[in-house]
Amino acid sequence: MAELVGNLLVAQSGGPTAVINASVAGVIQEAGRHECIEEIYGGRNGIWGILREDLIDLNDEKAKTIEGLKYTPAAALGTCRYKLDFKKKPEQAAQDLERLFAVFQAHSIRYFFYCGGNDSQDTANKVHHEAVRRAYDLRVIGVPKTIDNDLPHTDHSPGYGSAIKYASATIMEIAADVTSMATESGSCIIIEVMGRQAGWIAAGTVLAKRAAHEAPHLILTPEVPFVESAFLARVREVIDAHRCCVVVVGEGLKNQDGQEVSVDKSKVDAFGHPVLAGVAEKLEELVNQHLKVKTGTVKLGHAQRAAAHFGSAVDAMEAAACGEAAVRAAIDEKSGFMVKLVRMQSEPYKWTTDLQPLDDIANAEHLVPRDWISDDGFLPNEKFIAYARPLIQGEVKVPFEGGLPKYVALERSPVEKKLPPLG
């Protein structure tokens, strides 16, 4: 085995999760076990910050702080939504790669790990192929992350288990509240969760449903075309039976023409995706107009990905393991791969890690299988429950101070810059 001596750079990208920092902790702790890795750097705010040579020295951090990342939410290194977009901005993307490798060379970066979802893995893939083209000895490994759970070739993504654990518990609490309030005409509460193309988070809230009469009564996902008449009929049926109907809906719900129900095409996000304008409010209008019942909405929003105080212990353990596996793969001369989680069995739950070529990952999406959802499309079935239940097991042990979680923060000692400022 050829030993590659040099420095390591780890960065985070895209929306954070409750366990994305656990992956970074895994990278740092495993890197410390290998003498060929001399310095361990973090890129502030992902590729965006690396382009500006905004690096921090992770060797300066206390071991206790690095361990504390395993229960600390958000992106400790800072994140971004910046893409090397050769389709829309080829000249800018080419300039970015040139600058990126100038930073790598200036700081003797030989190991690069990028923690993120679909677009982030695409970025890692581009960096890997550019290193090969330049004959620059760099080992690039993607570390999976997304609460959306839509990365292909991995059984699931770190961050997903904690997201559905929190969402399911929150829906149990909301349902207990609203079902205790009797109204003459009945009521409907519509809870919107994240998930643009894939309905994994919405589907995961089925774990809150411990009996047939309990919430959520309907779960709407982007994988099943929304039919207005069928939806209204089922809401009416549930209200007649239970006086209250609790609906969970994924933000990317689509109609029978494949169009997002709540899309605002006049606005786009940083990746060029049309902005979603609020599907819960759209459904609220329908219910109010046609059923004349008291209706309210709840949007779980950023809490889905930030609620580390109620994180899944399995999720945090797997996230750290993915970071560790990434370093071991790079030391073993691998590059151009993403770490993936492999399920060995569900009961009792056993798993391991493996590698998948980034060429297979970049810009691909994994959707909820249709046969994991009931024939009428309104609830995930036992196949889905068997898949999801192991992922929420155990509680992350978060220290408390003054009655509130005591999260850690990195010192973020800056690495001296060696290049002219980015123009």
Image (cartoon, grey):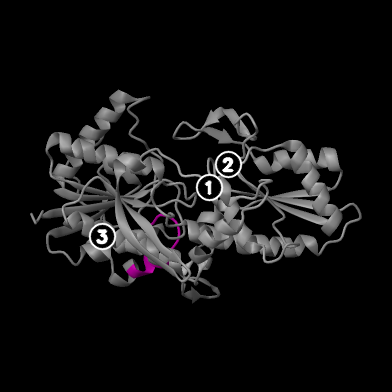
Question: What residue appears at the point 46 percent right and 46 percent down from the top-left corner?
Answer: 150
Which disc number belongs to residue 368? 1
Residue at which label 2 appears: 223
Question: What residue appears at the point 38 percent right and 61 percent down from the top-left corner?
Answer: 319
Mark 3: few/some/many CA within 10 Å (<14, 14-19, 20+): many
Question: What residue appears at the point 57 percent right and 51 percent down from the top-left corner?
Answer: 372
Q: Earlier in the sequence, mark 3 or mark 2?
A: 3
Measure how far apart labels 3 and 2 are at the Cα level: 42 Å
Mark in the foreground, 3 or 2 = 2
Q: Is residue 251 left or right of residue 2?
A: right
Residue 244 falls in which quadrant of the image? bottom right
Which disc number belongs to residue 18? none
Amino acid type assigned to the residue bearing label 2 in the image: Glu
Quadrant in which the C terminus is drawn: top left
- Tags 2 and 1 touching, CB below 8 Å: yes
Question: What residue appears at the point 85 percent right and 47 percent down from the top-left corner?
Answer: 293
Tell me the SS state at disc 1.
loop
Q: Residue furthest left?
A: 2
Q: Is residue 99 left or right of residue 208?
A: left
Q: Earlier in the sequence, mark 1 or mark 3?
A: 3
What range is drawn magenta here?
A: 67-76
Query: Residue 353's x, y, as percent?
Result: 32, 60
Whether residue 68 is visible to the viewer of this picture, yes or no, is yes
